């Protein structure tokens, strides 16, 4: 006899198709959607909700404009979004335009892939001065995210970037390049206008630990040197290793390469270039210095290795005269109303896929998480793929085991009726094709691949040019 909630395999195959809502059309959400519609256990139909009028998350609004190869990942994501049984519903903020409890009535399961878009805080004196900027805000500006400031003060001649990860490198590189070098990219006009007047000739990047602890990836670090306008400098004094650092190099080819590249920067002849980008290691930022309410410097404390790969302060302080500071100390996710959120680790509490009521506690049936909102804002786009597999395997196993509470509303039009009733100007995958074509034609006119449209209403207008059919 079959136990209730334990359908046989045949029954599972015969069961009505599952309807799943995936929240967030960044790489994690798109990979998860793909795995769901391709799984062989149950037929799944996915609605992919996205708050922005356009999909692709941080590939569109995080990856630097001078990284066209990485931005090109959208080509493979296009193939996913072209597939039947997957529907994009953009310009809808879940938690605001539609509540999670409402969505549960339309879907058998919900996967959260809401990523991260804001800066983690840096608690040092002066961090709230007007010229102390969060890296995420600057990224949002230069990558044309309509949710961020559209004007940027680039009058500082010397700037500091705090943080030795790839985001720090992106910010430093964009600040050190000329506007002309960036004009060939997809940057919008207002960004080019600001960058062409950028006064920065010295960009200083600071990290509190050493080469073996830097979070750069080798390719990004090496690529800094590809610009003729940037002289990359590392002080030979900043190259130091203890036993734990040597072990870190032995255990990671990538970390070893980072160390080798930093060593090469430290020993080579300086390049004749108008802009200097210096990477300072073993300098821990302790205060952003102020005069008359404006940034005039950054104070750092020299550190030294403690034998275990950590560092101790030496009590030796240096004041670096800079007029702007960019804090690239990591991104931070935000919660979605109606879903648990762990403020400490800034993720949705989960056991590798299932959403939990709180860390280590019970699962909430039918709710799942993947990507940066699941494991924190670390890792490359490729990492979100394996992440999505783990989550979607759990979801499908739960569906086959009959652990999902069935939805109340049938039919794929039910949710569209609700959105229309609410007057939500949702965008679709067909709409993205129209917006994409418009951005490409704007770019083509200037001999570049694309020029981004920034204005929210304009994006929606292009995406909805032909009225969306219900
Ligand atoms: C500045 C920067 C540069 C990077 N450069 C690279 C690089 O060169 N190469 C590389 O491999 N990786 C890079 N990364 C990392 C890469 O972007 C991430 O690994 C990846 O984007 C994480 O994917 P995700 O889908 O979890 O999150 P995201 O990309 O953040 O996508 C989340 C999506 O959810 C949407 N969303 C959020 N809340 C809601 C809501 N309430 N309702 C509806 N939608 C919502 C967001 O709008 C967004 O589209 C970079 C990251 C940053 C920050």
Image (cartoon, rainbow, N blue to C red):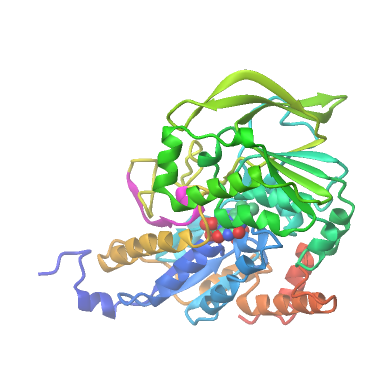
| Residue nearest the viewer, comparing 336 with 183 | 183
Left or right of residue 451, residue 267 in this image:
left
Instruction: Name, please, the residue furthest toward the top.
Output: 315
From the viewer's perspective, is residue 424 above or below residue 131?
A: below
| Picture coordinates of residue 441, whole percent (x, y) | 79, 79
The residue depicted at 27 percent of the width and 78 percent of the height is: 13
The residue depicted at 51 percent of the width and 39 percent of the height is: 213
| Residue nearest the viewer, comparing 374 with 301 | 301
Does the segment drawn in magenta span residue 316?
Answer: no
What stretch of residues is rendered in magenta?
362-375
From the viewer's perspective, is residue 338 above or below residue 448?
A: above
Instruction: Name, please, the residue furthest toward the left.
Output: 1
| Residue nearest the viewer, comparing 414 with 59 | 59
| Picture coordinates of residue 88, whole percent (x, y) | 57, 72
Rendered image quadrant of residue 239: top right
| Picture coordinates of residue 395, whole percent (x, y) | 35, 63
From the viewer's perspective, is residue 39 above or below residue 268?
A: below
Does the segment drawn in magenta span residue 367?
Answer: yes
Rendered image quadrant of residue 215: top right
From the viewer's perspective, is residue 279 above or below residue 179?
A: above
């Amino acid at each position: 006899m079959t136990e209730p909630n334990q359908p046989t395999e045949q029954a599972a195959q015969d069961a009505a198709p599952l309807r799943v809502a995936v929240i967030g059309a960044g790489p994690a959400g798109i990979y998860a959607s793909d795995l769901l519609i391709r799984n062989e256990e149950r037929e799944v139909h996915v609605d992919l909700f996205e708050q922005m009028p356009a999909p692709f998350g941080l590939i569109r609004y995080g990856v630097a404009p001078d990284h066209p190869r990485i931005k090109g990942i959208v080509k493979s994501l296009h193939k996913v979004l072209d597939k039947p049984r997957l529907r994009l519903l953009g310009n809808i903020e879940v938690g605001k335009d539609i509540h999670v409890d409402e969505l549960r009535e339309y879907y058998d399961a919900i996967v959260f892939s809401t990523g991260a878009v804001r800066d983690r805080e840096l608690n040092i004196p002066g961090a709230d001065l007007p010229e102390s900027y969060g890296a995420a805000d600057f990224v949002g500006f230069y990558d044309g995210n309509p949710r961020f400031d559209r004007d940027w003060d680039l009058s500082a001649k010397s700037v500091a970037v705090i943080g030795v990860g790839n985001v720090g490198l992106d910010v430093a590189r964009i600040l050190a390049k000329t506007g002309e070098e960036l004009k060939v990219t997809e940057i919008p006009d207002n960004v080019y206008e600001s960058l062409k007047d950028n006064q920065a000739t010295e960009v200083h990047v600071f990290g509190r630990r050493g080469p073996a602890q830097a979070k750069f990836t080798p390719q990004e670090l090496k690529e800094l040197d590809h610009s003729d306008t940037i002289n990359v400098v590392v002080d030979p004094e900043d190259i130091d290793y203890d036993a734990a650092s040597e072990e870190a190099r032995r255990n990671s080819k990538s970390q070893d390469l980072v160390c080798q590249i930093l060593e090469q920067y430290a020993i080579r002849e300086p390049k004749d270039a108008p802009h200097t980008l210096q990477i300072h290691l073993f300098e821990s930022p302790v205060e952003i210095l102020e005069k008359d309410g404006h940034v005039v410097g950054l104070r750092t404390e020299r550190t030294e290795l403690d034998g275990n790969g950590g560092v101790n302060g030496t009590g030796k302080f240096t004041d670096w005269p800079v007029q702007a500071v960019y804090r690239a100390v990591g991104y931070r996710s935000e919660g979605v109303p109606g879903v648990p959120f762990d403020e400490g680790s800034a993720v949705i509490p989960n056991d590798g896929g299932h959403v939990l009521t709180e860390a280590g506690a019970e699962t909430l049936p039918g709710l799942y998480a993947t990507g940066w909102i699941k494991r924190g804002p670390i890792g490359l786009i490729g990492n979100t793929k394996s992440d999505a597999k783990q989550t979607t395997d759990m979801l499908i196993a739960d569906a086959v085991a009959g652990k999902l509470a069935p939805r109340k509303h049938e039919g794929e039009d039910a949710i569209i009726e609700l959105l229309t009733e609410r007057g939500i100007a949702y965008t679709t995958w067909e709409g993205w094709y129209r917006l994409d074509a418009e951005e490409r034609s704007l770019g083509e006119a200037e001999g570049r691949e694309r020029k981004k449209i920034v204005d929210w209403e304009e994006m929606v207008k292009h995406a909805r040019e032909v009225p969306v059919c219900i």
